[in-house]
Amino acid sequence: MSDATLAPLTPLATNFKPARNRPPRIRPQAGAEDWVMRGAIALLGIYFIIVLILPLYTLLIKSVEDKDKNFIGLTNFARYFADPALTQSLVNTFTVSILGTVITIFLAFLYAYALTRTCMAMRGVLRAVALVPLLAPSLLPGLALIYLFGNQGIFKGALMGHEIYGPIGIIIGEVFFAFPHALMILVTALSVADQRLYEAADSLRASPFRIFMTVTLPGCRYGLISAAMVVFTLIFTDFGVPKVIGGSYNVLATDVYRQVIGQFNFQMGAVVGLLLLFPAVISFAVDRLVQRRQVALLSARAVPFQPRPRPATDRAFLIITCLIAAGLLIILGMAFLGSIITFWPYKLVPTLKWYDFTRLGTDGWGPYFNSLRMAALVAVIGTTIVFTGAYLTEKSRGAKGLRSALHLVAMVPLAVPGIVLGLAYIFFFNAPGNPLGLIYNTMTILVVNTICHFYTVCHLTAVTALKQVDAEFEAVSASLKVPLYRTFWRVTVPVCLPAILDISVYFFVNAMTTVSAVIFLYSADTKLMSINAINTDDAGNTASACAMGMVIVATSAVLKGLHSLLVRRLHKRTQAWRQR
């Protein structure tokens, strides 16, 4: 071919722009199983709308209406802040929450440091003792403090003329209640450390105090902030302790109860409920922000920290932890003694008459069996919903935006106080014309409310377990045309069984001990043991109320013991299977 023949092609070649070699986007067509999973995700979204979003929206609407349901804007809020007695409750709530948070974090940090950074003796026993308050309803420390520091208490003189009924009692009771929550977070934060940092500090001849300030504290600062936010929220929104030991020292949680139950002022109750909600939401947002900014403290080359024996330091921390553990056991032990003393403090002969609830005319053992039934339903139904929902948001294909939204909504219950959620349920499910009002004053609404209240922690547990399951299981099943439900039942569930058991026990124990979330929702036929204990204490029968609290503790302890044995057996079977 000659150059003349090529000449006309030159301009075309000059203006030619080669097309980008982009492979065509091929979107896999959704099969029947994909549509089923998308439908299940949609049902999960409807579930959240009914049990969480609409009740909170109804609470918001109620706060800007008058008694005739006319919109009045922020008038109710202005009326609240114009009342000195109500605004004082807000100040009181912040006061006890801040002081209780500082004390709790200080004690929990000492305890966690001793468990993770020393070689002291009895660490396993001390760790178990520190978690005992998780098994008790929040009203129980208040009842015990009455026997310890009340008008006829053993250590009444220790308060130097001050009364336990008020901020002192609330702070002590809340420290007992919130201590294990802070401890679990701080133990996790302090357990993660790089041995090389401490070796470098030692080689530079840094003092122990300097190492603590420059290595230890910076390494666990996010855990400290997270623990502080959790404890502040727990104390700020708790109802049981101030209801029992608060006396005339009003806080927001008792104000909500007084406005709704005592005065039937639902609009003002909604206002106080929103005031309870805002600090909890802020604390939750700060905690989530801190978690996002947290970086990994252990790299692939890191050496896990191993504490070295230091006899003097180990003995000092053993004494400190034993004193803290003794304080926890004294409170719980005093509640037990109060439940078996014939007539405090005049007749100290042991008796079991306070456990004869039928003779005392306190609805007998009916509330206890109601609590057992509700806790069992919450454990079974709640675990099913949570694990299935986590599986749908984590493992399903398609509808990515909806799955992300559902995961975000699943975080919301952690920021909603129980008493606020219970109040929102009153306004929504008891509204005229709501077809779901059929479940009001039934066991169903208690189960639905409790599952929603404790949903977030269980969801995070399930998601964490599912992330450890390789996605290849689903891929291989799809290639072999194995139905997804069969893979879920034969692979996913057995692998995640320990986490499923953890979720079930968490639901059961919290359902047995919950007070604030169900205080507005029970009826004469669905009264729970924790609620009955509060009513019994209001009637002046503190000993019987202690007995009810101890029955709850014993039931939760038995279940936790069975759970531990079952988990150990599963662990042994897993090890034996791996060795084969």
Image (tube, helix red, strand yellow):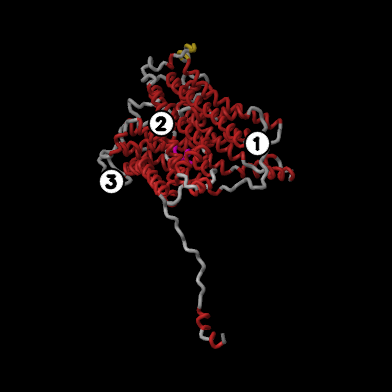
Residue 167: percent from the left, percent from the top?
A: 47, 31
Look at the image and give the residue range highlighted in magenta: 454-459
Earlier residue among tags 3 and 1? 3
Residue at numbered disc 2: 377
Residue at numbered disc 1: 117
Residue 340: percent from the left, percent from the top?
A: 48, 16
On screen, residue 75 above or below 508: below
Which of the pair 317/20 is nearer the observer? 20
Of helix, strand and loop, which one carries label 1? Answer: helix
**Residue ID at (39%, 22%):** 536
Q: What number is the disc on residue 71?
A: 3
10 Å neighbourhood of mark 1: few (<14), some, or many (≥20)?
many
Residue 215: percent from the left, percent from the top?
A: 65, 44
- Residue 546 visible in image: yes
Q: Amino acid at mark 1?
A: Arg
The C terminus - image quarter = top right
Of helix, strand and loop, which one carries label 2? Answer: helix
**Residue ID at (28%, 39%):** 434
User: Quadrant of residue 123 in the image?
Assistant: top right
Q: Amino acid at mark 2?
A: Leu
Image depth: mark 3 or mark 1 in front: 1
SS assignment for the magenta stretch, majority: helix
- Residue 163 visible in image: no
Image depth: mark 2 or mark 3 in front: 2
User: Quadrant of residue 526 in the image?
Assistant: top left
Q: Amino acid at mark 3?
A: Phe
